[in-house]
């Protein structure tokens, strides 16, 4: 990952945590029912997730009490606007943006000497069946302060009111209580520590529950797509819910998405784009073996590209160039079918969300398309960084250089 780090492409917006903030973070972990970290320093993202603590605990989503009960931690206002690097749901960042938009000023004040635990309540105690993910609808975001600072404030204010009455100002025991409260929590009289709960609505989304599920329910009819074959087989036994269920590898899924006006393609237009060139080059790189030149040079140099293309066996060559071959044949006759000529993975990779979808739904569908066909390295980095990091480790060093160049230059 060193090359990615040097290029600022690997979790480059994490916030370093040390000193007193570590203690507060641990207090949040304990309050949420987790074991504290033994680390003296670490980093966190926008929702309070730390890659170092995840590695320490050997649990990626260590802020979850089961798949149905995710949490977050805010210990600094610097978390505002920061990425959520390993979201459990695609709407996690939207929830955090809502939190900071509504409670931003209060968070600035509270985190001076306190931390905030977030409970994302979906009104689901636990999952039992894979289609339980359909229960995700309205989410209530609850806030809890470590050391119950809000309750300490109420107690301190009540002591102040007692102090003001009659001759209570001469009560030494009352003086001691006020001083003890002030020493423990500071002067809380004029601080606004009330964070009212927030409502968030989940429409279509992706969740990592059940090893990855897409819920598309804002279209012609609800569609649920499972990444895990075991859970897919369990889900299709359901006779209660009126939904269409797919496994992500089923060819029929793409056809259904087209029929429901969720995705579209235009091969004649897409071949003119840098996106097509990027996808074709990456696909070509996967066919190269024992090259005499660095892969980056082969992909960037037209002469070398043609040279190595002609060295491939005929089937690999046809696979890489299948779209252009199809369009050439189409000019001569319309009897040719896409499925007979164009490689299926390449064809799937050239789809895009339907132009009628709003931006939020387009992002979700891009993520789904990228998980169906991972040939677009730039979009894989944008929409599924964790998967990108996994496959990145398997690539040739020169290919890594080319991919970094693609991402940094958006080409």
Image (spheres, helix red, strand yellow):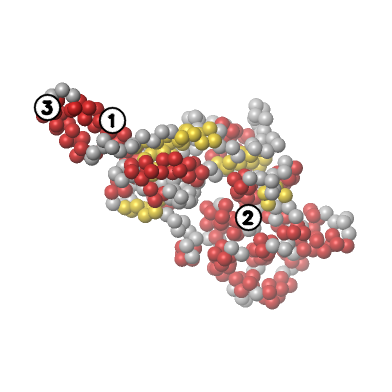
Mark 3–mark 1 Cα distance, whole angstroms, equals: 20 Å
Q: Which residue is under mark 3?
A: 171
Sequence-first disc among 2 and 3 = 3
- Identify the residue shown where x is 61% and y is 64%: 411
Q: Position of residue 119 (x, y in %)?
A: 43, 36
Determine the residue positioned at 77% across, 59% down.
Answer: 268
How far is mark 2 from mark 1, CA to CA? Answer: 54 Å
The image shows residue 223 at horizontal and vertical percentages of 66, 38
Question: Residue pushed farthest top?
Answer: 166
Residue at 49% from the left image edge and 65% from the top image edge: 7
Helix, strand or loop at mark 1: helix
Picture coordinates of residue 24 (x, y %)? 31, 44
Q: Secondary structure at mark 2?
A: loop
Residue 103 on image: x %, y %: 41, 40
Foreground pick, 372 / 332:
332
Reading the image, the residue beneath label 1 is 154
Where is mark 2, residue-wise? 374
Residue 279 visible (yes or no) = no
| Residue drawn at (63%, 34%) of the image | 235
Occupied quadrant, residue 142: top left
């Amino acid at each position: 990952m060193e090359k990615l780090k040097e290029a600022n492409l690997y979790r480059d917006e994490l916030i370093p945590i040390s000193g007193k903030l570590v203690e507060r973070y641990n207090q949040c972990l304990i309050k949420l029912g987790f074991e504290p970290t033994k680390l003296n320093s670490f980093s966190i993202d926008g929702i309070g997730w730390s890659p170092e603590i995840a590695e320490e605990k050997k649990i990626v989503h260590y802020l979850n009490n089961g798949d149905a009960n995710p949490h977050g931690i805010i210990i600094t206002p610097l978390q505002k606007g920061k990425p959520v690097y390993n979201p459990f749901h695609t709407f996690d960042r939207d929830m955090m943006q809502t939190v900071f938009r509504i409670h931003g000023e209060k968070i600035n004040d509270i985190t001076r000497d306190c931390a905030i635990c977030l409970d994302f309540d979906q009104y689901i105690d636990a999952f039992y069946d894979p289609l339980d993910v359909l229960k995700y609808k309205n989410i209530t975001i609850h806030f809890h302060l470590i050391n119950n600072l809000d309750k300490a404030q109420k107690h301190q204010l009540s002591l102040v009111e007692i102090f003001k009455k009659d001759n209570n100002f001469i009560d030494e025991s009352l003086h001691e209580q006020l001083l003890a409260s002030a020493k423990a929590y500071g002067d809380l009289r004029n601080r606004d520590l009330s964070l009212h709960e927030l409502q968030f609505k989940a429409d279509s989304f992706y969740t990592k529950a059940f090893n990855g599920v897409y819920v598309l329910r804002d279209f012609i009819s609800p569609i649920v797509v499972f990444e895990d074959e075991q859970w897919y087989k369990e889900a299709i036994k359901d006779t209660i819910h009126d939904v269409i269920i797919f496994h992500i590898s089923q060819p029929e899924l793409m056809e259904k998405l087209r029929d429901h006006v969720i995705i579209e393609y235009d091969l004649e237009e897409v071949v003119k784009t840098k996106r097509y060139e990027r996808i074709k080059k990456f696909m070509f790189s996967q066919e190269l073996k024992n090259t005499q030149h660095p892969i980056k040079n082969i992909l960037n140099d037209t002469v070398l590209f043609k040279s190595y293309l002609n060295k491939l066996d005929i089937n690999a060559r046809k696979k890489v160039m299948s779209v252009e071959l199809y369009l050439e044949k189409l000019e001569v006759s319309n009897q040719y079918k896409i499925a007979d000529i164009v490689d299926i993975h390449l064809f799937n990779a050239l789809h895009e969300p339907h132009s009628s979808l709003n931006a939020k739904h387009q992002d979700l569908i891009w993520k789904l398309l990228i998980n169906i066909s991972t040939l677009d390295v730039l979009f894989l980095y944008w929409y599924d960084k964790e998967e990108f990091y996994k496959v990145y480790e398997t690539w040739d060093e020169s290919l890594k250089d080319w991919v970094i160049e693609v991402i940094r230059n958006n080409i």
